[in-house]
Amino acid sequence: MAPPMDVMTSSDEESQEWKTTQSRRLSPAVLLAGAAGVAAAVLLACHASGSMSKAPPQPLSVRALLESDELAGDMTRNIMAFGGDADQEHVHQRVVAGLGEIRDAIQEQQPEAHNKMGLLTLSPTQKEAAMRVLNKYSDSRMLGLTQKVVAAVRETAEEKGDQTVLARKLSERLTPSLSDMRQLHKEMFPGAGDEFKLDLDSKHWNGELKVDLGRRLSAYNGDVRSQARTLFQGLERELGDEMPKAPGRMLLDLGSSSSTPGTSSSSGDASFMDCVMKAVPDPTKVVSCIADNMSDVLSMVMNFMKGKA
């Protein structure tokens, strides 16, 4: 027996034709909505994964770095690390004011250097390298070394000892931290080498140690100036002769080494000992002394250890 034939009425045919027409009309809209959804999903995924392209860091001038919020923030963090002032906002305002004073002084006293600093540009890599030592101010290892140096200077002054006594006390306190000092030296001055020599002028080292333990901390933004000088030294290392030397010399108020940081100095007047005697009790100045004379400090400690062997 033959199967029944499907019979479609004219009404059924009209209904089918209407559905087909509607489907064709909706297809572009559906496709557009689907494409938009896919695009949104891709953008969201890229944002979540961090794969969206970002504008590369732009070079900035030396003067712009000196006036930057980043530098003021780093210096504030360094000062706060020593716990001398618990009010971070107050410290930040003082740092900004101190940097402004330095900028104005350079502009007034060294106008040519001020103009050149506005033209000299730093790549992101150069900026990072120039700030390498400054960023070690708040390193826990550096804080520990600073505390030991301050304690040795205070003890020597209270005992009315001379510089020989100070050298012994410094060496005794710093010997356990020799590995930290070596590592800090490598991190602050990559490629400086491990050869250390200490040339101390014994004629310069006679007499009782004179230290003013009553100096008021940061009375004239000395902690800001010492950090700024460290920054200028870093800029001189990175930019060479292009970087004006006058601003760094202008900030040389510590009596510390004027030689290239990370290298040993042979001048008694520029020794680590002279520097810390003038720096105490300001911890940021002591850090500057350690950083400027790290090779001398290492040599002093190693010579002390050899003498005890």
Image (tube, rainbow, N blue to C red):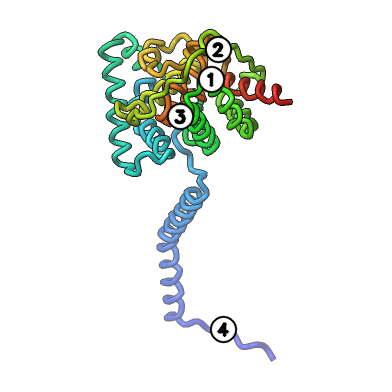
Q: Would you name the residue on which mark 4 appears?
A: 6
Q: Would you name the residue on which mark 2 appears?
A: 265
Say few, some or many: other residues with alpha carbon within 10 Å of mark 3 (under 14 / 14 to 19 / 20 or more): few
Give the label on residue 158, or none.
Answer: 3
Type of amino acid under label 1: Asn
SS at circle 1: loop
Considering only order in the chain, which callout, 1 or 2, is on the residue closer to the N terminus?
2
Q: Is residue 35 above or below residue 201?
A: below
Q: Residue at x 41, y 63 (%)?
A: 26
Q: Residue at x 30, y 10 (%)?
A: 110
Question: Quarter of the image holding residue 141?
Answer: top right
SS at circle 3: helix
User: As rendered, which of 167 and 242 lies closer to the eye?
Assistant: 167
For marks 2 and 4, give the CA distance.
108 Å
Quadrant where the N terminus sits is: bottom right
Considering only order in the chain, which callout, 4 or 1, is on the residue closer to the N terminus?
4
Depth check, mark 2 against mark 4: the one in front is 2
Q: Farthest residue in the right direction?
A: 309
SS at circle 4: loop
Q: Is residue 267 left or right of residue 304?
A: left
Say few, some or many: other residues with alpha carbon within 10 Å of mark 2 (under 14 / 14 to 19 / 20 or more): many
Q: Position of residue 116 (x, y in %)?
A: 35, 12
Q: Are marks 1 and 4 in contact (CB under 8 Å)?
A: no
Q: Are marks 1 and 3 in contact (CB under 8 Å)?
A: no
